[in-house]
Amino acid sequence: MPLLHVALSSAVALVLQVALLGTVLPASQAHDGDHSADPATVLKPALRGLVVTQPRSLATVPYADFASLRLPWNSIETAPGVFNFSSIDGVLAAHDDVQFRLRIMAGIHSPQWVKDVSGGCVLIEPNSPNGNTGCAPRFWTDAFHGHYVNLMEAVAARYEDNPQVVEIANSECTTIYSEPFILGADTASIDRLWAANYTKAGHETCLRRSTSAMMDLFDTTRISIAGHTRWQYIVQAPGTRTTASTRRRGRTSAPSSTS
């Protein structure tokens, strides 16, 4: 019987461990606005203060310096290796005095052909009214990782040298939420993920290698992960066999956060 496990504080610890995979800049280079260091390794400014979560809100909050731009992957890569960045470029041009976090949403928003070549997708029904129903990819597979890296290579080629794009969110290991630590799956969906060979180790590997790959691709653009104080992962319940035919419907534990 697969169970949805919620580990207290594990998400925060894993984020810190993942961050250590990349090259750590000396303190003199890590500070924003330090022009004494090599310009090729100085990080772009971090989002701070008032951050508008939707570009259209800039019409009513014109004094915001930072904003977040969310777009589904399937609207960017319309066919294998065919990228359409016009929607991003349009927003940047319309707000040339604003710097952006770019979040290209994977999970249920991944292209269908990516889901297919990665072993097929898994129907996720949310365990919360805040979630969306959708078919999530097997993000823990090598095939999915390869296609996500290809996407990030194209994004880096276009925006690494663009001063308006200061942060890229890592969305590779997501299902229906922006946080890769939250599966958000109801009981039946837990069984489907388990039957599709989801494992905690595979989930952690996805988080580590995707972040490492992005840090290699973006020298100055910041890489972020939508964090959470809990990490949801699935484990095999004690005393049950691991064959799919013997698994019964498991319990779910809804994600929660602490302030």
Image: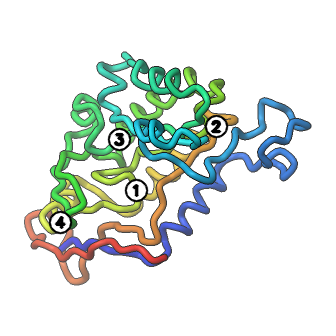
Q: Secondary structure at mark 3?
A: loop
Q: Quadrant of the N terminus?
A: bottom left
Residue at image point 84% right, 50% down: 26
Q: Position of residue 200 (x, y in %)?
A: 37, 63
Q: Is residue 147 left or right of residue 238?
A: right
Residue at image point 69% right, 42% down: 45
Mark 3 vs 4: CB contact within 8 A:
no
Q: Position of residue 31 (x, y in %)?
A: 80, 48
Dot 1 alpha-carbon crowd within 10 angstroms: few under 14, some 14 to 19, many 20 or more: some
Residue at image point 33% right, 20% down: 80
The amino acid on which the numbered mark 3 sits, given as a three-letter code, is: Ala
Residue at image point 10% right, 73% down: 248
- Please report whichever mark, 3 or 4, sits nearer to the chain's N-terminal start: 3
Most foreground residue, 141 or 98 = 98
Q: Secondary structure at mark 1?
A: loop
Q: Is residue 75 visible?
A: yes
Task: Name the residue tied to disc 2.
Answer: 221
- Please report whichever mark, 4 or 1, sits nearer to the chain's N-terminal start: 1
The amino acid on which the numbered mark 2 sits, given as a three-letter code, is: Thr
The amino acid on which the numbered mark 1 sits, given as a three-letter code, is: Glu
Task: Name the residue tied to disc 4.
Answer: 186
Separation (CA) of disc 4 from disc 1 = 16 Å
Task: Name the residue tied to disc 3.
Answer: 106
The amino acid on which the numbered mark 4 sits, given as a three-letter code, is: Asp
Most foreground residue, 19 or 74 = 74
Mark 4 vs 1: CB contact within 8 A:
no
